[in-house]
Amino acid sequence: MIIHIVTAGESLSQLAAEYGVDIRNLAADNGILTNDSLVVGQALVVQIPEVVHTVQRGETLTSIAAAYGITAVALLRNNFWLKGSSRLVTGDRIVISYSDQQKKGSFSTNSYAYPYVNSGLLRSQMPYLTYFTPFTYGIAADGGLVDLNDEEMRRIAEEYGTDTLLHLSTLTEGGGFSSERASMIFQNDAMRERLTDDIMQTVDEKNFTGVDVDFEFISPSEKYDYIQFLQELRLRLNPQGKLLFSAVAPKTYDDQPGVLYEGHDYAGIGAAVNFVLLMTYEWGYTYSEPMAVAPLPSVRRVVEYATTRISANKLFMGIPTYGYDWTLPYVKGGAGAPSISPVEAVNLARRYGANILYDETAQSPWFRYTDDDGRLHEVWFEDARSISAKLALANQFGLYGIGYWNSMRDFPQNWVILNAEYDILNLSLL
């Protein structure tokens, strides 16, 4: 695999010929069209096929996989242009393997999506996921579980052999989030028992592999109550062969101040659950100054601290699949920056003739452009380079997994890089 940085005058057809690859595959792997012009500074993933199979009449993805001693899911991963579909046409060229594709390690993977996710987009990503987590179940005023209409998402995950997790947050019946609901559960034994019973019933009825608890803005005075809740839930889940995950704020030391951090005790939460997701993103966010969403030095500091409190083989490192488009000059408290996908970011640069730059410290691409109304913008996003750097960091520390927030945006390069550089683990039961 090669990451090619576009220079002035280069075209996709020229590069496809130069590297000896199919232009359709090259375009699909990078989320562009075959006739799109390229952007100076744009990163392109180039995969050089080693073994290619031409589909014959009557052949299926399953039969081709069996002939080469691999799985159909592996073929989907090697051919992103299929977008998770097993439908083949006679004459299609299927990549069985790539040259010089030495795996650096392995990860378990997880990603999240809202019920209104585009089903085609979700299918394109599902072959790369160990787990998939519909977002989100909540806590009712009486302590019961606020349900989620996730039937379609769970059905798609099942088609690909991807295991699903029940995501529990402090969502209310009204659709908002309330840390008071968490506090209510901590302080009321009867409500806590009812919530746990509802969770166990839903896990059983919907065949979830486990539960992912994400309680944010926990009061510092209740951080041990939170740990106790997680311990009690694990004692119900694990004997049934079910797993317990928990998401934690991106801390760098024990007594880090701030409402996001003080209620999360890394050592206690790590001991209480099977796996922990580090929410290592949102340094650059809607209302912040323009900056990388997940600058690598900041992510590194969180991982360094986390591995002193939690075993690396329990940790999933969070990776964002989006960026932000800020209007300049930045005004604190002003209108927020909209989030955009990496594909949309490159399209913006193309539309407005911007060159894409790369911040070597943050390990993140960015650019500026002037819109049709004469307003200056600054965009930070993710690309093949930044994803490769983040995966390398997680691998360096021996982390068990990667957690993507989220599957709502198109980002082919992420999945191509992941598959090219790492093996994706299947479910590991207790």
Image (spheres, helix red, strand yellow):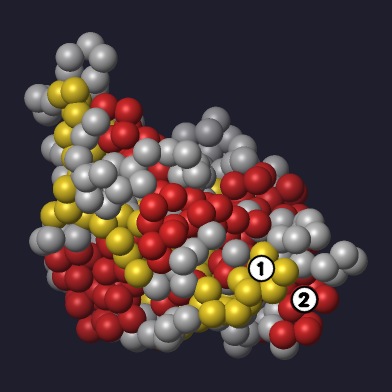
> In screen coordinates, is 404 left or right of 153?
left
Residue 430's disc is none
Would you say 212 lies left or right of 84 here? left
Q: Tell me if 422 is positioned left or right of 248 in this view.
A: right
Q: Residue 64, which numbered label? A: 2
Specify the quadrant that holds the N terminus.
bottom left
Residue drawn where x is 82% and y is 68% of the image? 56
Quarter of the image where one finds residue 94 = bottom right
Q: Residue at x 72, y 85 (%)?
A: 68
Q: Mark 1 points at which residue?
A: 94
As drawn, 234 above or below 197: below
Q: What element carries label 1?
A: strand
Tell me, yes or no, whether the two marked residues, 2 and 1, touch with CB atoms within 8 Å.
yes
Q: Is residue 383 visible?
A: yes
Q: Where is residue 321 in the image (x, y as percent from the top left)?
A: 40, 52
For badge 2, the amino acid type reads Ile
Residue 378's place in the image compared with 302, above or below, is: above
